[in-house]
Image (cartoon, grey):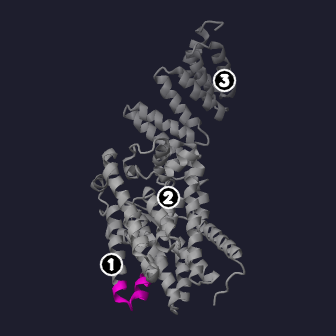
Amino acid sequence: MVTAASTPSRESLFRWLLACGIFALLLIFFSPSWGAFRLWSRIPELSGMIETRRAVSVLAQVEHPGAPIADELHRAIQWRLFFPLVGRVLQLSPPLFFGLAYVGCLLVLAYLVTLLRRAHYDWTESALATVVLGSASWFFTSTGWLGYFDSWLALALLLAAFARSRHLVWLACLLAPWIDERFAAAAPLALLCRWLHGPENVSLRRDVAVPAALLVGFLLVRLGLLSGHSAAGATVSGYLGSRKVLDAPPARIALGIWEGLRAGWCFALAAVYVLWPHRGRAIVLGAALCALGVLGLATAQDYARSMTMLLPAAVLGLVLARATRHRWLPPTLRLAAAVALIAPAHHVMNDAVAPILNLQYALSFLDHPPAIAMPELYELRAFHAMGRGDFAAAEADLTLAIKLARNPASPAKQRGILAASQQRWPDAHRDFSTMVEHDPKNPDAWLMRAQSNLALNQPTAAGSDFDRARSLAVADWLTRPDVARFLVRLNAAPVGK
């Protein structure tokens, strides 16, 4: 039997401590890509990484709420203004702003622990169940992709389904659609779970009519008044018309369904099983789960994320299973928690599957960056661009290579040569100086800077650089044709410049 804590304050403290511990555990097993976050903060041009791409659009929303989103992939978030407005009003820095998603994760975990304790789970069972429900797409996305606030969507759905205070339910229905429109589609299931959890406590007016009115009000504003101010991809028809979200192999769709709740699926299905003695209720819940799951898949590019809408059903299954004292519950909890932590995790989209790695691998990213952060690839791409005569693209790639390289001497040399070929000698001098700074024992680095100094009518500086190059060079260096030609030009330069 469960032994209650001696005081409510002590119980609350233990709930928060347990939630914090589970939060840390999940971050170890399913770590965000800290290297990608750091890379983007250092080099904003690398905003195309999946971990940071939406963040660019969300920061644009903070600056200009309601303005069309430039990134076509993320135009659907144009009116998800709750957190952009919070960030704007509070003047939050990007780390603090994106950290709100992590705050949401902790709140969801703490609320899950609270719900389970209220359902008379002991501390061990509460921990196991929270690990299962936390090892799901809402957590992975909120922590692993900047600019996604799925944790707050999950919290709003849980409040709509299980909050004791109806005012919290109403607040969720009022605000959550402006975090993610999917709340309007998922709220009926959450309210159904509320009724199935305690039908004798549900008031038709307070628990159904008021939330329904709030959601209808949102839909009238969002699909009515604001639809005319939306870019094509920010409207429902525009978003669905621009993407074939179900155009994916069946195996990928199935994987996306699994990754949505992962081991938590067994408890969502358990809700139907436990309700089966009441056939009508079980059938209604099962039909609602299927309908909402299909709707999520048909309207979202991120298959796994779309299953977050079904999270209240998994919690309902746990609560009902405890109330009916099913013997299979304790071993199922232990097995589900093991599967949740050990089974490989993925972000699943209609066009890609991205693995979620543990903390050890995430930290190795810091020393072994992926291809998108390899300066050699950008330098090679710049060579191909120069071969095509696309010098602007070549310079852009070389600029990235310089920022990415631990030793930028090589890409700086190539960008300097490109600038020199266009007679942009101040830019060439800047890059050759970078080359000298990072490769000071290379005589050619000093020679190139000497050439740029001479082109800038600074023969004294050019002579000093040339003398330095000659002191570093091998014996026959002066016999090289390019060196000999430059020496003639240097000796012919006017004195006193």
Identity, as a three-letter code, of the amino acid under mark 2? Phe
Rendered image quadrant of residue 277? bottom left
Measured Cα–Cα span from mark 1 to mark 3: 83 Å
Q: Amino acid at mark 3?
A: Arg
Residue 497 vertical placement versus 210 (above, below): above
User: Sequence-wise, which precedes: disc 2 or disc 3?
Assistant: 2
Magenta segment = 269-282
Circle 3 residues within 10 Å: few <14, some 14–19, many ≥20:
some
Left or right: residue 35 versus residue 471 is left
Residue 38 visible from this viewpoint: no
What residue would you read off at disc 3?
A: 470
Q: Which residue is mark 2?
A: 149
Judging by the rendered image, the residue that carries numbered circle 1 is 287
* Cβ–Cβ under 8 Å for marks 1 and 3: no
Question: Residue 16: horizontal and vertical position, in percent?
Answer: 65, 70
Q: Quadrant of the N terminus?
A: bottom right
Q: Is residue 274 magenta?
A: yes
Mark 1, Cα crowd under 10 Å, few <14 / some 14-19 / many 20+, is few
Cα–Cα span, label 2 and label 3: 60 Å
